[in-house]
Amino acid sequence: MENCEFYRNLLEKLIADQISEPENDLLIKHLKTCKECSELFDAHTVLTKSASPFEDLNADDLQMMRRNVLNSIQKKQEKSILNILQKYLDYLRVFIKRPELAFAAIALMLGFFLGRVLPPDENGITGGIVRQINNIAKQNIHFTDTQNSSYQYSNVSMKEIDDQNIALSFDVTTHLDVTREKKDPLVREIIAQTLMNPEGLGSRLKAISYTESILDNKIKDALIFSMQRAPLPAIRLKAMSSLMNYKNDPQVQEAFIKVLNEEKTIKMNLMAIDYLTDSNFNADTLKSVLSEIDPQKSSAVFIRAKEYIENK
Amino acid sequence: MERTDMELIEQTLSGEHQSYDALMIRYQKLVFSIAFGICKTYENAMDITQDVFLKAYKKLDSFKGTSTFKTWISKISYNESINWQKKNSKYQDYEDSQDFELKIFKESNQEDEILAKENKAMLLRCLFELNTKYRLAVVLRYFENHSIKEIAVSMNCSEGVVKNMLFRSIQKLRKNLLAIQSGA
């Protein structure tokens, strides 16, 4: 008998459907002479040609099986929804046990809802301005009316909400002519704002000139701001002149020390030295600051500083 | 045009249960044959089939398509059937072969159908001579047209082991299968 071990391997390949054509030819040739291998081959063939015993399963049983599966899936989903509802009911029970929590939650939700739904407060300051500009807008019929309107709109953005509505966001300014006492808070407010306004050189200088007769903390702060931050030396100098009226003021003294350390304008440095030397500023501290002045900065400033140091 | 397995899966996951029904119709015989191959009783195989499809539904979103759905569900069927067998091996009823033949095979008075039924019954009896794993390998290879690779994946073993199981099964069943061939 031929080496059946080799052909058993080929049979195994055949059963696994992994046999090549040359191998298959070899095997077929062997089967003609080997009864045992031939029987194995035939057994394999019987299985290959047999219909599946599960081909004609009972259709009703299968349908019932599938129905059971789908019903089970449906029930689980319904249970899942019930579980979610149950969870919310549990939360509700917490609120019932702690009514203060419930009230807080309701108040929060109500506030949020009202804030989103209700129109702006017409009785407040904003409401008052809105009413005024509405009235003016109604009165402005022609283009020239709008051009000459007392209200100016800037920083405008618009968004269409729907076919009927547009959301408007804007700044509104209006020109007013009023007369007030110098000590009036409105006067100080407007002067302070003007001093901090980076634009309007003329208005800033004018505002500074009015501060010379007004001693006020708000204005003092605005003057210090201008002295330190104004881009033009003329404004910084003018502000400093006005600050000279605040005698022995620690805040002004500190600001003037900063001038000596940082400011390049010679006149401002000389003014700082004059102010500080005439004030109650600590002499030793001033000596120390003045001794650090670099002669390269300005000979005039250096000499003034040296005079003070030598005389004190 | 027939929907692909992936399309049915996606539709099932989006809530269309009828798509899952279509998927079950496509693979119910495969799942049943694996279950029956292991538990050997009709009712239990039907119960296991139901459990397999429920489990498959729960895990459906984890099916990424790296293997075929056929392989994927075969693996679940195999695992569920083996688990069932472990739990119920002490109490397993071995059905009388005539009982399960009655349940599986439809009634007929046609001679050719009767003959076919006889052959199928003999085939099943042959299969019952094998142990569980060998039987399953034969079912998957010859009746469900699984490749050796697919069988290996389903049964968590190597391809070499599968080939060996199949060859040994043929060796064992040689005489009975030849009897079917000769019409005895």
Image (cartoon, coloured by chain):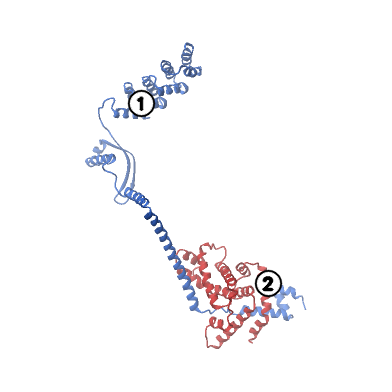
Q: Quadrant of residue A97?
A: bottom left
On the question of residue A163 being in view, the answer is yes
Taking the spot 43% from the left edge, 65% from the top edge, the residue there is A79
Chain B takes which shade in the image? red
Is the N terminus of chain A in the top left, top right, bottom left or bottom right quadrant? bottom right
Is A258 above or below relative to A126? above
Q: Nearer the viewer, residue A34 or B14?
A: B14
Residue A164 numbered tag: none
Q: Please, which chain is the residue tagged with disc 2 on?
A: B
Q: Quadrant of residue A13?
A: bottom right
Taking the spot 48% from the left edge, 71% from the top edge, the residue there is A69
Query: Is residue A109 left or right of B59 when viewed as pictured?
Result: left
In space, the residues marked 2 and 1 are separated at their CA atoms by 101 Å
Residue at the spot of label 1: A217
Q: Please, which chain is the residue tagged with disc 1 on?
A: A
Q: Position of residue A265 (x, y in %)?
A: 44, 20
Is A263 above or below relative to B40? above
Residues at marks 2 and 1 on the same chain? no
